[in-house]
Amino acid sequence: MQDARLDPVLLQSFVAVAESGSFTRAAQRVHLTQSTVSQQVRRLEDQLGCVLLDRSGRYVSTTPEGERLLGYARRLQQLMAEAVGQLRQSAGQGEIRIGVPEDFAARPLTPVLAGFADDWPGMRLEVTSGMSHELWQRFQDRELDLVLVKQRVGQAPGLASWPEPLCWIDSRGRPAVARDPVPLVAFPVGGLYRGEMTHALDAGGRRWRVAFVSASLASILAAVADGLGVTLLPRRLATAQHQVLEDDGWSAAVPDVELSLHAQPDLPAAARDMAARLAALCETVMGAGEPPADQPKNSL
């Protein structure tokens, strides 16, 4: 069976001869000897089983078969050059892999990412949202460059951290707090707030049951608002449809939690800039004041 693959080196010599009309000029163009170019074109003709160049005149010209091949050869060369260019460009750009809790995954994070993309158009951003223990494990496995996680205060020192006050919230229109056992709206097993909820209720001698489970923060907030149960969440996430439970029985025995920013060592300049922008965002979201308008690059 005849080999249907075309050697790009042979095609290069053929195109050079066809476009220059001379084996001598073609050899200069591809930086080979004239005899080598001639041999390469002969090999291509033998492979295809037809004459590609008319060598009888003063100038070399293409035969009908050569004219047909010339169009394909130019397209193949263009595609190869485009592929090499794209890959080289991509290799020089790099990527930043970021892990964030779900309450940071959309607003207000996306404007920060958009601003970064304007200043670093060559960088690719990959953002993963999820529960903190999962994000932390991926960071430990070096699958993430930057990560924001919820953790107990001082658990793992990072670049920066911010207090995250927790509170019990219930539905304003259909409260569930008086039910016995208390219905809980919770994240899946392993979620930070789930463990805090059950430990606090056990310590207070309250009976409880898990009534609703979801990995989605939006679903958790909606379930509480519609009266499916109570939950423990950052105070800043409570909405007008929720009421915060603040009597002594609900405000005690909840450990302090913080939001912490962690980064892999020896990050490139673009990733350090992204870390600085994430820190400024957290300052705003966590209520520590507005970041400066002229936040400098690479401040972390």
Image (spheres, helix red, strand yellow):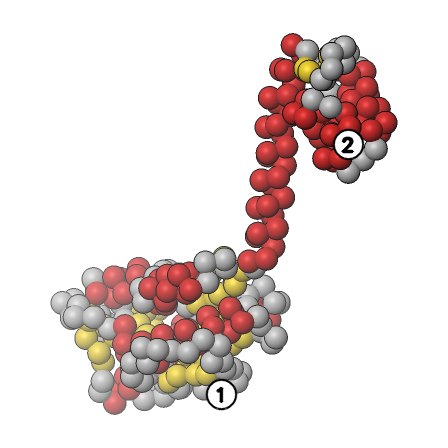
In-front residue for pair 132/11: 11
Q: Secondary structure at mark 1?
A: loop
The residue that mark 2 highlights is: 27
Res. 16 image quadrant: top right
- Give the farthest residue toward the front: 58
The amino acid beneath tag 1 is: Gly
Disc 1 or 2, which lies upstream in sequence? 2
Q: Residues within 10 Å of mark 2 (few under 14, many from 20)?
A: many
**Residue 154's mark?**
1
Task: From the viewer's perspective, tell me whether residue 175 is left or right of residue 71.
Answer: left
Image location of residue 298, percent across then percent down: 49, 77
Classify 179 as above or below 203.
Answer: above
The amino acid beneath tag 2 is: Ala
Image location of residue 219, percent across then percent down: 30, 60
Q: Residue at horizontal 63%, vertical 44%?
A: 84
Q: Residue at horizontal 30%, vertical 61%?
A: 218
Answer yes or no: is residue 294 visible. Answer: yes
In-front residue for pair 248/181: 248
Identify the image quadrant of the N terminus: top right
Q: Residue at horizontal 38%, vertical 78%?
A: 295
Query: Could you tell me how many numbered marks the image carries?
Result: 2
In-front residue for pair 8/270: 8
Res. 210 image quadrant: bottom left
